[in-house]
Structures are given as structure tokens and as C-alpha cells.
Amino acid sequence: MKKKSLSFLLAAALALPTLAQKPGKPLDRPKLVVGIVVDQMRYDYLYRYWNKYGRGGFRRLLGEGFSYENAHYNYVPTYTGPGHASIYTGTTPSVHGIVGNNWLVREEGKGTYVTEDKTVQAVGGSAASGQQSPRHMLTTTITDELRLATNFQSKVIGVCIKDRGSILPAGHAANAAYWYDGGNGAFITSTFYTQQLPAWVAKFNAENRAAKYLDQAWTTLLPIAQYTESSPDDVTWEGAFKGEAKPVFPHDLPALSAAPTTAVKGNMEAAGEKAPTATPRNLDLIRSTPFGNSLTLDFALEAMRAEQLGQRGQTDFLALSFSSTDYVGHQFGPNSIEAEDTYLRLDQDLERLFAYLDKTVGKKQALVFLSADHGAAHSPNFLIDKKIPAGSVGPGLMRDSLQQQLVRLHGPGKWVLSYENQQVYLNRPLLQEKKLDLYQMQREVAGIMLGYAGVTRALAAEDVQKSHWESGMLMYLENGYFPKRSGDVMVILEPGWLESYQYPINKGTTHGSSGSYDTHVPVVFWGWHVKHGQSSAPAKITDIAPTLARWLHIQEPDGCTGQPLPEVLGW
């Protein structure tokens, strides 16, 4: 009976009715692929605000598309850089090398940023914002493979407020990737892609749309009493904007954006720019409002129009990421009215996008997927208030405490170089000088870390490298571990616990763990050749790229470890 079942499944898979090409017919491909990544979107956001969504956004996506209800990330840490890279490469950090948003470069003795590239120059913005490229990513992306498969005739463009949310999905061979520079309120790029902004980008930037969005107060889209899915507006676990007394509506964006943040000033000074006589506005503020998503879509629609994406006789690809959901989530937390309002407004932006695709590319002519780069934990103090186990740790405090203990045990020296991505980076040259065995020190440090509050597991990197796990918590560690970039000791926090960079103060939330609140995200396909339905079968985020490859009849990314999703492909 078992052999018969296997034979039947194999025959069904070989038939591939959805993807079969008829003899004599032109190759069947969508006119445009649109990849949508919503930063920090937990799976439950699809349904939490369902009764308040309109008909043309999330409801249309789920009502006409195919949803994987049990899709998860299969590694830690769950951050923005690794998330975007994993979706588009079809593999985990253990292969593509993007182990975090930042990591320590041992050879240089200093940290690097995920898309940092000092060999390129900014185009349209400051050096600090513009010296970016995908060179740290070690594998191809599905967007790279589309360019290769069409002899570079397909256009690929990445758009996001965050640099990493645009650059990594667009891949190495993209025509362009654009991101937002809060110092001048413009979408910029780098010389990795071009030497000069296209005329349409310069024209868009000249319209100063970010400033116009910030000329209005952020009030709730609906009467505030209707936000029954969220906590009261004034709670202690939400973070206020700088200049606000309380984190409550309405948020006076014109007043809050009247002066630049310290970060913007620092970027200007780092770039060698002379401070202007008149104080500029803080246009970076738009990131932490729902209007940052609207601005992103405005730019994406203009990119599709100007570049004629999906209207040139080739399959093009728009890699579109919405990041304001992440900034709002970090500041206010998942249970805030601000988070709910941001998703209700994003729903309207998605409706605008889908209507544009219907009008310009044609109904069912664009293939769209929507997912997220990670989820988010509830705010610890919110959970504690509800008598649910939770807590926070201070990464700086953990690093310093470990350093002090190692000095007591082994004498003076800078034993800990960094604590990043819930990983300890030890000073390996110092260990060699002191004739201390690296593996033994890793195990000793793991034992020390296990004694800290909130830590449920700590593992030596060498144990991760030499072992293999098919499932469970240790599998997540293994899939997120890249020997040349990861730390010496991997730390796992208890469920509901998170890193607070303002410790002991807990405001808002963060992510990065193997908890289901961080790993469980939407995976929805819509449009070209997608039949309506849903599946509760286990799916991994790394399965998106090989599924797209099967639809497009192209090679999957060269490091791909995911598998095509049979239900949506009709296998």
C-alpha cells in the first residue's frame, strides 16, 4: 500500500498540469512578478484586523489568492537582512552568509553593516546612506536568476525605505535598487547600479512628497473607539516620539519633524557636509509613521510607470518592501492602536497597488507574493501585565558581565569583542596568546551565559558546526550559523523574552528568536495562474524562491535549499 501511494504521488508530480507547456505555444510566463515583503508582519495580522480591512487589499489577496497558513522561518536570528535574503535566495544564512543586520568582521576587528560597501559611492544622497550594495550576500537570488535566464532582458527593480529591504531582494544583477535617505527626503541609490539618478527619480524627489506627508498630523483612520483589537491608547509599554509627552493620538507630525534628529546630524557630519544655516526638517520621521509605506508605494508606482514594468514583452520583477510597519512595531508594540492603524492604512495602499496592476499590466497578468521578513514578540510589559511569562535582557549588560567574569577567571584582557545577534564573539588572538583552547573557552562561556536570567540555552559554535539537527531549536541555530561571520557562542532566550537596547526600560518590541511569534509569517500568492485556496501544510520561507522558479521555468538560486510548494503549483 505504501509503495502504491508513493508511485501515485510521483506520477502526479511528474504530470505538472499547471506548469505544462503545450507544443507549439510560446513560453507561458507572467508579465510582471511583484514580491511584497511587509517588515515585521506577524501571520495573525492577516486576520486580527480582518473586519476593518477594505475589499481591495488584504481581503482581495486572500479571497482570490492562495495562502499558506503554516509558513515559518527555519533559522535564527530572525532579522530584516537575513529575512529578505532568505526569501529571495531560497536558503538560510548558513548558505547565503547574511547572518544579521550587523556582524563582526574578525579579519578587520570591527563590525560591518549588512549592505555596507565602501567601494561604491552614493548617488543622490549622503555617503553614509548611499555606500551600499549586495556584495555581502554570497548566493544568487530569484531576481538574479530571472535576469540570467532572459539574457538580462528582464528588468529587476528593488524599492524600500530601508536600504537592505531594497538591495538584497533586487540581487546582484538588478537594473536598480532605490532606498530612502532621511537626510534629504529623497530616494537614492549607489554607483553599484548607476552613476546618475534617472530623470524620473530626480523628478519624483523634487516633488518633496515626504515633507508633504509630514505636514499632516497622524490621526486614526477610524474613530479611535473602534480600535477594539488593540490596547488603550495611553499605556506604559509604548514608546513616545521624541518631543511627545505621551505616546497617544494625535501625533503632531509637523511639530515633531520641525528639527532633525541627532542621527541625521551625525550622518551629515560623517559625510563632511556643512550644517545649513537654517535648521532642516527631520524627514527621517516618516519611517515611523504609516505614511512611510504610502511614500514607498508612490515611488514604486512611478517606477513601474517610468520603466514600463510588465509592459515590454518580457517578464519583469518589482521587489517591493514596506518597512514602516517595522518602525511602528518596534516603537509601539503589536498591541498598539498605532500598529493597527498602520495596517489599516497599508491595506489601502495594497488596494492602490492591485488596482494599478489591473489597469496597466492586466488582470491575472501579474504574479504577486506577499510575505514578511520576520514577526515580532508582544511587548514584555504588556504580557507581564496580563500575567503571561515574559521578560527582557540588556545585551550590553550581558556583554559587560561576561567580560568581567572572564577577567576574574583568566586575568586582564579584552576577552569579549562583541555581543551581536545573541552571539558572543571572543577575542581569538588573545586566546592564542594566553594558550587557551578555543573550544574549551566556548563551552566555558556557554556555561556562564546559561546562568543569566532569561537564557534557556547556550551552545558553543564548534558544537553547532560539527552537529546536525533535522528539527527543533538547535536546527534553527544550525541554519543561521555561518562559520566565517557568526559568533563563538550562540544564546537562546526563553519564550516571550527579548533583547531591550534601553534595558532596564522596556518600550515597544523587537524580534530575532525562534519563537513562533517571530517565525510564523504570511505566505500568500495571487494573480497569474494562482487558484484560490489555502493550505495548512508546513511551509518554509525558503520555499518561495524555488516555487517562483518553477512558475517562471528558470533555474532556482544557486544556493537554494528550499522546495517548490506543490499545493499552489497544482501538483
Image (cartoon, rainbow, N blue to C red):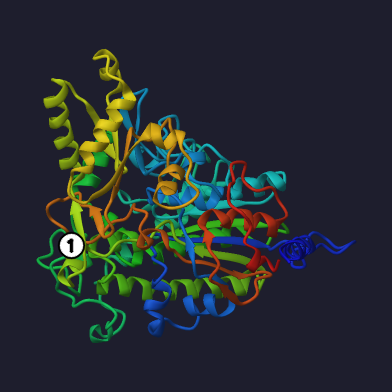
Q: Which residue is mark 1?
A: 239
Is residue 273 visible in the rendered image? The answer is no
Q: Nearer the viewer, residue 216 or 14?
A: 14
Counting from the top left corner in percent of width and height, residue 19 is at 75, 63
- Give left or right: position of 525 versus 282: right
Q: Please report the residue visible at 55 percent of the width from the left and 47 percent of the height from the top.
A: 89
Q: Please report the residue visible at 57 percent of the width from the left and 56 percent of the height from the top.
A: 543
Q: Amino acid at mark 1?
A: Gly
Image quarter of the C terminus? bottom right
Q: Nearer the viewer, residue 407 or 5?
A: 5
Counting from the top left corner in percent of width and height, residue 433 is at 26, 13
Counting from the top left corner in percent of width and height, residue 288 is at 29, 61
Q: Residue furthest front?
A: 1
Label 1: element kind: loop
Counting from the top left corner in percent of width and height, residue 256 is at 18, 62
- Residue 38, image quadrant: bottom left
Q: Please report the residue visible at 63 percent of the width from the left and 68 percent of the height from the top.
A: 568
Is residue 249 visible in the rendered image? The answer is yes
Task: Identify whether 110 is placed above or below 518.
Answer: above
